[in-house]
Image: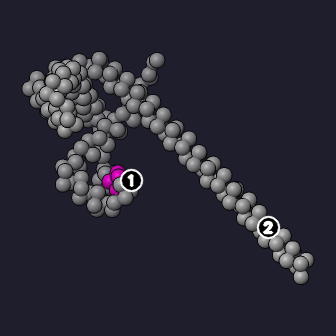
Amino acid sequence: RAIAEAKAKKAADKKAAEAEKRRIKAERERAKKEKAREAARKKREAEAEAREATDRKIIDALIEAAPFDLPEDVVKEETTRRIARTQAMLRMRGASDDEVEKEVAEASSAERAEVEREFRSGFLLDAIGKNEKVFVTETEVEERIAQMAAAYHRSTEEMEQYLEQRDMMGSIRNNMREEKVMEILHKKVKIEE
């Protein structure tokens, strides 16, 4: 009987050891997969940052190559709107009037320059899009909405309704068109470091 109990204990110990080995192996596999996911995420982020830097260089070169005046009232209105938004955010965070005034004074010229850059960029990309006959199909818009819905764990219908309620569909189409124009520009231009 003692021999049978010893054999049973030995078998149980062996099963426990095998289970522990399987658990450790599974844990290592999970860690390995997580490490691979993290590496892939970092790679995607690095690629996106490099792409944004290249996009910025292309836009800067376009703006430099094709200077034009912007309607002062439109630039001023958008700059004022952005500064007001900055003021509101600072106040919501509890900043004093002096802090708000200082921050706005520092940001005003930079904000104006960014507004001018965005407007020039938009006009130039629109002109290139027209020249290159770039358009976005309804199918492409639907696919983008489906991607957005999946990212936010919503149905496509819910996402579309959300975007329509906020008048964002035109903005989505315009962004997609600009992405297509940038793809064309990436193929046509050579960036020098």
Can you give x and y, in whole percent of width and height, for residue 93 in the image?
Answer: 22, 37
Mark 2 Cα shell of 10 Å, populated few (<14), some (14-19), many (≥20): few
Residue 21 occupies quadrant = bottom right
Tell me if 29 is positioned left or right of 4 in this view: left
Looking at the rendered structure, the kind of residue marked 2 is Asp
- Nearer to us of marks 2 and 1 is 2
In front of the other: 183 or 79: 79
* Residue bearing the label numbered 1: 151
Tell me if 154 is positioned left or right of 107 in this view: right
* Residue bearing the label numbered 2: 13
In front of the other: 190 or 99: 99
Q: Which residues are magenta?
A: 144-149
- The residue shown at (24%, 44%) is 171
Q: Does label 2 or label 1 sit earlier along the sequence?
A: 2
Mark 1 Cα shell of 10 Å, populated few (<14), some (14-19), many (≥20): few
In front of the other: 171 or 4: 4
Provide the secondary structure element on which disc 2 rests. helix
- The residue shown at (28%, 61%) is 158
Label 2, label 1: how far apart the Cα atoms are: 47 Å
Q: Residue furthest bottom?
A: 1
Tell me if 15 is positioned left or right of 27 in this view: right
Can you give x and y, in whole percent of width and height, for residue 143 in the image?
Answer: 36, 54
Provide the secondary structure element on which disc 1 rests. helix
Looking at the rendered structure, the kind of residue marked 1 is Ala
